[in-house]
Amino acid sequence: MDLQAEKLSILQAIMNINDEGLIMDVKAFLSDRKTDWFDELTEDQQKDVLEGLAEADRGETVPHSEVVKMYSKWGLK
């Protein structure tokens, strides 16, 4: 996705709107929107998270009990 092109497209659409209520809704949406933690990650970090989710979806996980066994030898619980 070309983010700059998307922004320009949205700006053009907003510039052509004459509905004051819709403009106020857009303004309220933008001012109330909270940043998602995922959006604050670097691109590499986002890729790692998405890959981990894909692995989990494919069932490529290690049960918690196995992880506890693996790390218990270092005194971690």
Image (cartoon, rainbow, N blue to C red):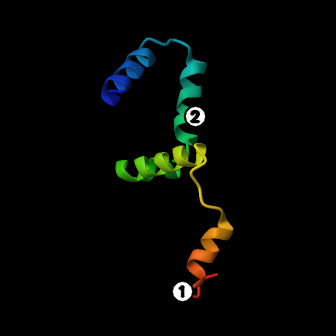
- Numbered mark located on residue 56 in the image: none
The spot of residue 26 in percent (x, y) is: 54, 27
Type of amino acid at the residue the image marks with label 1? Trp
Q: Nearer the viewer, residue 42 or 7?
A: 42
State how many labels appear: 2
Which image quadrant for residue 12? top left
Q: Is residue 30 above or below residue 21?
A: below
The Cα atoms of the two marked residues, 2 and 1, are separated by: 52 Å
Q: Residue at x 54, y 86 (%)?
A: 74
For image coordinates 39% across by 22% down, the residue present is 11
Q: Identify the residue at the far right of this view.
A: 65
Residue 28 got which mark? 2
Residue at 66%, 66% (x, y): give it: 64
Name the residue that disc number 1 marks.
Answer: 74
Question: 15 left or right of 31?
Answer: left
Name the residue type under label 2.
Ala
Residue extending farthest bottom: 75
Other residues around mark 1 within 10 Å, as few (<14) / some (14–19) / many (≥20):
few
Q: Secondary structure at mark 1?
A: loop
Q: Locate the C terminus and report the quarter of the image it occupies.
A: bottom right
The x, y position of residue 23, in whole percent, is 53, 22
